Image (spheres, rainbow, N blue to C red):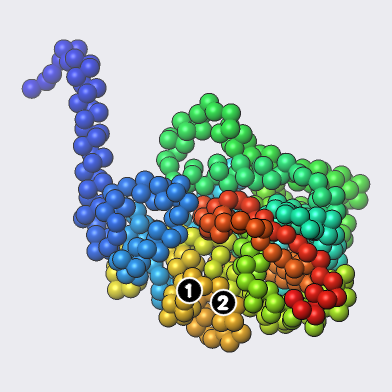
């Protein structure tokens, strides 16, 4: 029987359509929650119904500890979202991140596509990623990063001078470490530092970085249409956060322009010095078809380096320094090693030396274990055909991951995991090595790892060699409680210490 469409009440039709959509949505949620193979994977009941559970944990700044608690409650495989599973075993590490893995990064990473351009951190396709990574891989390799050493040594020297000027009173080391990291990134990425250690000046970069940290991660957790609404929220602070990405990327504009102008006057060739910088490597690159990268891609890549290389290193240093400051025994032992090896405390030691100093490296590794800067489960997607991990079948498209936070807290590998015990690394076992993943693993392992190690080793060595580091009276350890919002940070977002120059007498008795 045909119905005359004109006779229908449009309000009723709209209502019926809406009701149909809601029923379909609810049916889908119930089906995904209870009738897919993921039903076999235990986990919190809200997590199987909606991603809002995970979003809530993110905004409570305790996603990692919550997932860790889930491992204790449900075992080493836990459903943390309608389509998300977290794992906590060596088998999972090998399957997901091992050599030749077919598990590619999840859609969530696209949220870090700065200015809308894919970068080395966000590209999914393994071939495309390998091609992009190759552009700067040599410059950032262990054997090459020594070319940046003279600059890094200058920054460390200026860092110690800055600390000297502020010694004797309570200072907040967090922004100082952040600016040190920014100086180092400036030298490596641009061949030009921000000179923040030299001048001791503040830089708007800090606010822009904070803005990015607030605005970028959440957009990966909501649908595109929801984000379009959220980002229009007419709040001044929120709009400032949203603008952080563009402002941060714009810091590289001047250097890119300068290198382009040079090339224009030299038959399109960059100078030797330019080619040693990441900007130069990107500007000099041509793809297999002879096409250069666009300006937007290069700006986005350099923004990614700022982002990946600043707070990661500086917050790691902050947590490590705090642990050193609050334990007389650890600081005494570390100082003992440094006093023996750095005879002139005004001279930055050589890299070859610091790499081999056992206690210094044990302190740093313990810091990276307990306070891995990016400890979240590094999301990957189960490839076509599905995969069986921990005896559970996970269909293709399931988002899986292992979080360093939990792997670094396995008591059978790291006894008393919440304690800061550098000594455990003096006798490092093969098992500890396999369970140490602060820089990620496999083909997507951190590209800045060697730069970060140089910076952390030299900064910590010189700080403790030159000053006794103590916590101010009334310091509340809860200020340094580790919060996570993909990257970790101390609850109070500050690290207040007093630096007392070591005189000869103190040198003998720390
Ligand atoms: C203590 C300091 C650092 C830590 C703990 C750290 C941690 C990480 C982790 C866990 C990843 C892997 C993410 C994933 O698989 O999803 C990563 C990737 C990356 N990191 Fe770092 N990072 C640090 C410092 C740096 C520095 C100093 C730079 C640059 C100067 C940098 C540049 C990168 C880049 C470009 C990637 C993407 C690599 C790729 O996907 O191929 N990182 N980092």
Residue on which the image places disc 2: 421
Task: Give the structural element (helix, strand or loop) at label 1.
Answer: loop
Residue at position x 51%, y 72% from top?
Answer: 419
Residue 280 picture location, percent across and down: 79, 55
Residue 53 picture location, percent across and down: 36, 49
Mark 2 near mark 1, Cβ–Cβ under 8 Å? no
Residue 56 picture location, percent across and down: 40, 47
Residue 271 picture location, percent across and down: 88, 57
**Foreground of the two, 215 or 204:** 204
- The quadrant of the picture showing ligand 1 is bottom right
Left/right placement of residue 344 relative to residue 453 reads right
Query: Is residue 4 at all visible to an observer of this figure?
Result: yes
Residue at position x 43%, y 34% from top?
Answer: 225
Q: Residues within 10 Å of mark 2 (few under 14, many from 20)?
A: some
**Foreground of the two, 347 or 453:** 347
Quadrant (top left, top right, bottom left, bottom right) of the N terminus: top left
Place residue 449 in its image quadrant.
bottom right
Q: Residue furthest left?
A: 1
Residue on which the image places disc 1: 417
Q: What is the count of numbered marks?
A: 2
């Amino acid at each position: 029987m045909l119905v005359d469409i004109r006779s229908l009440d449009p309000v009723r039709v709209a209502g019926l359509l809406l009701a149909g959509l809601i029923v379909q949505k609810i049916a889908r949620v119930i089906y995904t929650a209870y009738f897919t193979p993921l039903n076999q994977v235990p986990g919190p009941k809200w997590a199987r119904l909606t991603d809002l559970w995970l979003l809530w944990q993110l905004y409570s700044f305790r996603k990692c500890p919550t997932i860790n608690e889930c491992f204790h409650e449900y075992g080493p495989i836990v459903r943390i979202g309608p389509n998300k599973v977290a794992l906590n075993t060596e088998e999972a590490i090998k399957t997901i991140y091992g050599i030749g893995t077919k598990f590619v990064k999840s859609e969530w990473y696209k949220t870090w596509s700065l200015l809308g351009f894919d970068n080395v951190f966000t590209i999914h396709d393994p071939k495309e990623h390998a091609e992009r990574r190759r552009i700067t891989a040599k410059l950032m390799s262990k054997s090459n990063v020594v070319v940046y050493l003279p600059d890094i040594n200058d920054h460390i020297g200026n860092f110690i001078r800055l600390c000297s000027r502020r010694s004797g009173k309570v200072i907040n080391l967090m922004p100082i470490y952040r600016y040190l990291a920014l100086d180092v990134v400036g030298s490596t990425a641009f061949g030009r530092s921000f000179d923040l250690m030299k001048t001791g000046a503040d830089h708007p970069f800090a606010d822009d970085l904070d803005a990015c940290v607030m605005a970028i991660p959440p957009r990966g957790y909501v649908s595109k249409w929801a984000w379009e609404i959220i980002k229009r929220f007419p709040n001044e602070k929120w709009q400032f956060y949203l603008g952080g990405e563009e402002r941060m990327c714009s810091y590289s504009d001047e250097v890119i322009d300068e290198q382009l102008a040079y090339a224009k006057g030299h038959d399109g060739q960059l100078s030797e010095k330019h080619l040693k910088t990441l900007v130069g490597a990107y500007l000099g690159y041509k793809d297999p078809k002879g096409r250069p990268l666009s300006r937007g891609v290069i700006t986005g890549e350099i923004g990614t380096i700022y982002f990946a290389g600043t707070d990661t290193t500086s917050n790691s240093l902050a947590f490590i320094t705090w642990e050193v400051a609050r334990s007389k025994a650890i600081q005494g032992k570390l100082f003992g090693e440094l006093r023996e090896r750095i005879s002139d405390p005004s001279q930055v030691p050589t890299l070859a030396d610091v790499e081999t100093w056992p206690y210094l490296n044990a302190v740093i590794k313990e810091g990276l274990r307990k306070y891995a800067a990016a400890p979240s489960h590094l999301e990957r997607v189960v490839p076509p055909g599905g995969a069986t991990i921990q005896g559970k079948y996970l269909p293709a498209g399931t988002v899986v991951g292992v979080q360093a936070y939990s792997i670094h807290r396995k008591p059978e590998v790291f006894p008393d995991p919440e304690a800061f015990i550098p000594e455990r690394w003096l006798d490092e076992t093969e098992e500890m090595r396999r369970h140490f993943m602060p820089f990620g693993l496999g083909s997507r392992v951190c590209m800045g790892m060697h730069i970060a190690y140089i910076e952390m080793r030299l900064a910590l060595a010189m700080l403790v060699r030159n000053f006794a580091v103590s916590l101010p009276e009334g310091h509340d350890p809860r200020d340094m409680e580790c919060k996570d919002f993909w990257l970790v940070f101390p609850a109070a977002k500050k690290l207040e210490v007093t630096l007392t120059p070591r005189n000869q007498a103190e040198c003998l008795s720390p």
